[in-house]
Image (cartoon, helix red, strand yellow):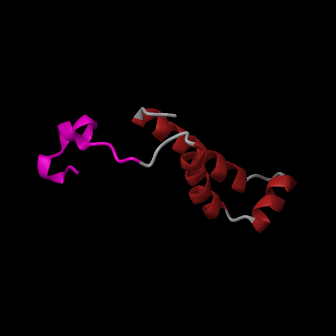
Amino acid sequence: MLTDDATILGLLAATLGFVFYTSGSDSPAWQRFYRYVPALLLCYFLPALYNTLGLQTGRIRSCISSPAATCCPRRWCC
């Protein structure tokens, strides 16, 4: 299970990058795949699958440990 926020963000960014890169690919296999499976559906489905498989949890972390806590006023935090 991934617990570091930066690692989870990197995984999500890589996943979305892969989906959008392959959706614009000229490869006939990817064009055939995306003819039936919309890219936007994968953008929602794959992160949900990570949660189901236990790679990351859907738990919201406190804002005290986030970098935004040093930049934002306290009332903006969770």
- Between 29 and 75, the residue placed more toward the observer is 75
The picture places residue 16, in percent across and down from the top left corner, at: 58, 49
Residue at far right of view: 28
User: Which picture quadrant has residue 44?
Assistant: bottom right
The picture places residue 60, in percent across and down from the top left corner, at: 35, 47
Q: Which residues are magenta?
A: 59-78
Identify the residue at horizontal 53%, vertical 44% (top origin).
12
- Between 25 and 4, the residue placed more toward the observer is 4
Identify the residue at horizontal 57%, vertical 49% (top origin).
52
- Between 67 and 17, the residue placed more toward the observer is 67
- Between 65 and 40, the residue placed more toward the observer is 65
Residue 70 on the magenta span: yes
Residue 25 on the magenta span: no
The picture places residue 45, in percent across and down from the top left corner, at: 61, 57
Identify the residue at horizontal 32%, vertical 43% (top origin).
61
Residue 75 is left or right of residue 30, and the answer is left
Q: Count the numbered circles shown.
A: 0
User: Which picture quadrant has residue 53?
Assistant: top right
Q: Is residue 28 above or below residue 13?
A: below
